């Protein structure tokens, strides 16, 4: 008898075997499970028994198994992708209301196993602001951090160093990680002078990185600056987008208080990288090392996320919540680029507005699809994940919001409060900005973030009295709240 | 149609903003909303449902009393700590941790707080319109009022003689009212 094939079911999981299991393993697994679930046995379960049999019927026949694997792969359900999607909803059973209601959905994309695909070779460029304002300890700290960065390079990595002020200069062209001495020497000779023109530095760095882009290299540019660039922001953003399309990421580290946070945020977002605020010298060293580790542990590249709400569901907002909190553009049918996935998972949070009178029963409300380049051969892999909830007119049972989601929401709402405050401030509404920052302070205090709460209070007072925040306080809050991203330990908080 | 299916908007108790049903954090002020009322009732283990269910308090239900102080008695050691109550002032309960800048008004370190599972930042007490509230601050082992676990970050009304349990440490509350 030919077995029916249902690609929606994960037969491998039913039998508890991996996708590359041998026929012997499959047989053994089947026998054990059949004994356990046989209706005549004490642990019998007719439904499960039937499922085990169905799985076995498909997987024991090589032709059927191949057909099944193909069908699953084409549906994006194949389990050989090195990444997985998990989701959480604020309620899994909802009342069928005559009005709109809000549902929170969080999804996390993470590596399937703790082990990545091994260390990836890197193709990097460091872009260093050498303007006059960097003079003194600031430049010395940057140099120190870069020396450590160079020491951590692997022989197969590549690094170029570009310094810029009014002009850009290639201090060291892209060389292998074996040429540490040359890199160290060039860094030591760096002397600050001139102004800050980011575009020139960025262009020169991209030229260096482009020489080796492709293959297994993870290509990335890290920009370090302490000042504002004038008039070349737009050009820089266009370049960053072009680079991202070629698979070159850009991160931006702001040192001190005088740089333009909105510009560096936009630059990093366009470049699928991170923007970060460096307020202490030790932080720069730590961040650079983190960057290096993150980039070399990349397990999937150029992630594209597709969010497909079902009929009757309206996407109100979408945010990145892991590793850092930040806005994402509403997809409008297209893909949201999430950059590379390293050993740290990527989380997104959605506000979904359920339209009035939803259909009763269990329904798919949302579908996530992720496309990425995986493995050493950078194979294009597609992954799918459905989110389902039940609508009922009956009694809705008490449900706990999953701790991981609730903790994330708490942090995300604080981040949003302060971002909203800056927007009101920009419009000149100091009263609203003050109120919002005060609210943020209260919430931060509740979360045990005493230091950030204090900064928020202080800036609220400043805005109230002087109409403007301090540049330092604003950056502390913006970058502090976005780093409140949830850690795995938070799952245990409410146990 | 029952009331529940109409799904009225959630009015934020802190700022008055209207939020869609299902909202968990007020979009205006970020406060944690106990969305949907009965939908959010915590299951009560080993107790009859409803009978003792403690609901968080809406501001509109508050009366105006003349509270001036609170004494908290640590039942195990018998230590009594009188604290002043002031409108808008908060009393933090927990364990002192100078390194992380945590200085609770009521420090339970010397009462064996750690062994009893008291978090460094465990709970807080504040007064509003003459009513005294207890709020759990997402502590590891929870805050119980009269043996009922509190939902973190929601204010629960405190009454004279109430027993508060932090982890496994029991405290008795004495409220002092001004003679009218």
Image: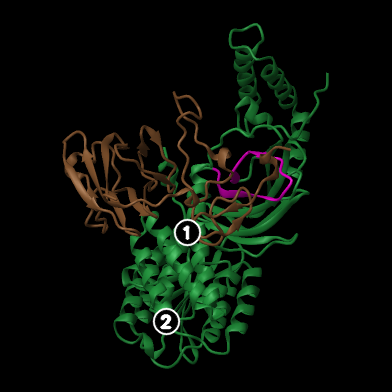
The relative height of residue A415 versus residue B2 in the rendered view (above or below) is below
> What is the quadrant of residue A306 in the picture?
bottom right
Q: Nearer the viewer, residue A91 or A376?
A: A91
**Do we see residue A344 in this rendering?**
no
In the rendered image of the structure, the colour used to display chain A is green
Of the pair A63 and A291, the residue shown nearer to us:
A291
- Which residue in the structure is indicated by mark 1? A294
Residue A79 at x, y = what percent? 65, 40
- Please tell me which residue is depicted at 36% across the width and 37% down the height of the picture: B145
The local secondary structure at tag 1 comes to: helix
Between B145 and A85, the one nearer to me in the picture: B145
The residue depicted at 41 percent of the width and 37 percent of the height is A495
Q: Which residues are magenta?
A: A83-112
Q: Which residue is mark 2?
A: A226
Q: Residue furthest right?
A: A1
Q: Whole-percent x and y of residue A303?
A: 63, 57
Residue reaching furthest to the top: A40
Classify mark 2: helix, strand or loop.
loop
Question: Do callouts 1 and 2 point to residues on the same chain?
Answer: yes
């Amino acid at each position: 008898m030919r077995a029916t094939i249902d690609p929606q079911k994960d037969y491998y999981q039913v039998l508890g075997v991996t996708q590359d299991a041998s026929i012997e393993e499959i047989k053994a697994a089947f026998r054990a499970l059949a004994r356990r679930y046989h209706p005549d046995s004490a642990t019998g379960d007719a439904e499960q028994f039937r499922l085990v049999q169905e799985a076995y019927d498909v997987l024991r026949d090589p032709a059927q198994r191949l057909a099944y694997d193909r069908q699953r792969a084409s549906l994006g359900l194949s389990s050989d992708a090195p990444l997985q999607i998990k989701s959480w909803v604020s309620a899994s059973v909802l009342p069928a209301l005559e009005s709109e209601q809000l549902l929170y959905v969080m999804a996390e994309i993470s590596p399937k196993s703790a082990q990545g695909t091994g260390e990836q070779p890197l193709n990097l460029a460091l872009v260093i602001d050498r303007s006059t304002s960097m003079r003194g300890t600031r430049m010395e700290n940057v140099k120190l951090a870069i020396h450590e960065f160079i020491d951590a390079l692997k022989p197969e990595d590549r690094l170029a160093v570009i310094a810029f002020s009014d002009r850009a200069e290639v201090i060291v062209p892209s060389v292998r990680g074996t040429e540490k001495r040359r890199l160290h020497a060039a860094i030591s000779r760096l002397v600050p002078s001139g102004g800050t023109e980011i575009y020139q530095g960025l262009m020169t760095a991209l030229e260096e990185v482009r020489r080796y882009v492709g293959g297994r290299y993870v290509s990335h540019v890290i920009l370090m600056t302490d000042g504002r660039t004038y008039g070349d922001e737009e050009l820089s953003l266009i370049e960053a987008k072009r680079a991202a399309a070629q698979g070159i990421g850009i991160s931006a580290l702001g040192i001190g208080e005088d740089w333009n946070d909105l510009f560096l945020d936009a630059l990093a977002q366009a470049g699928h990288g991170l923007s970060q605020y460096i307020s202490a010298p030790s932080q720069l060293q730590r961040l650079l090392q983190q960057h290096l580790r993150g980039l070399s542990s990349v397990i999937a590249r150029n992630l594209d996320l597709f969010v497909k709400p079902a009929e009757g569901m309206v996407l109100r907002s979408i945010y990145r919540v892991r590793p850092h909190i930040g806005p994402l553009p509403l997809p409008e049918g297209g893909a949201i680029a999430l950059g590379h996935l390293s050993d740290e998972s990527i989380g997104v949070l959605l506000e979904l507005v359920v339209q009035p009178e939803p259909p009763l029963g269990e329904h798919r409300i949302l579908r996530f699809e992720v496309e990425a380049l995986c493995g050493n051969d950078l194979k294009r892999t597609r992954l799918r994940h459905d989110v389902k909830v039940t609508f009922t007119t009956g009694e809705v049972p008490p449900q706990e919001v999953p701790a991981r989601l609730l903790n994330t929401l708490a942090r995300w709402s604080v981040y949003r409060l302060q971002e909203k405050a800056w927007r009101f401030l920009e419009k000149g509404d100091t009263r609203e900005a003050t109120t919002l920052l005060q609210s943020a302070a209260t919430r931060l205090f509740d979360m045990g973030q005493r230091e950030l709460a204090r900064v928020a209070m202080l800036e609220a007072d400043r805005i109230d009295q002087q109409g403007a925040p301090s540049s330092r306080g604003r950056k502390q809050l913006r970058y502090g709240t976005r780093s409140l991203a949830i850690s795995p330990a938070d799952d245990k908080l409410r146990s | 149609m029952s009331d529940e299916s109409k799904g009225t908007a959630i009015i934020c108790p802190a700022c008055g903003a209207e939020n869609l049903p299902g909202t968990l954090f007020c979009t205006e002020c970020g406060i944690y909303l106990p969305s949907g009322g009965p939908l959010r009732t915590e299951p009560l283990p080993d107790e009859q449902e409803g009978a003792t269910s403690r609901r968080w308090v809406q501001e509109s239900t508050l009366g105006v009393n003349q509270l001036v102080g609170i004494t908290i008695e640590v039942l195990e050691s018998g230590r009594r700590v009188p604290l002043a109550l002031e409108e808008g002032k908060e009393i933090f309960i927990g364990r002192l941790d100078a390194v992380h800048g945590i200085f609770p008004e009521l420090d339970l370190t010397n009462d064996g707080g750690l062994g009893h599972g008291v978090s460094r930042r465990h709970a807080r007490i504040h007064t509003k319109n003459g009513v005294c509230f207890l709020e759990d601050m997402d502590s590891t082992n929870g805050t119980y009022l009269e043996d009922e676990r509190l939902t973190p970050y929601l204010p629960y009304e405190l009454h004279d003689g109430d027993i508060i349990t932090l982890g496994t440490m029991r405290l008795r509350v004495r409220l002092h009212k001004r003679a009218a």
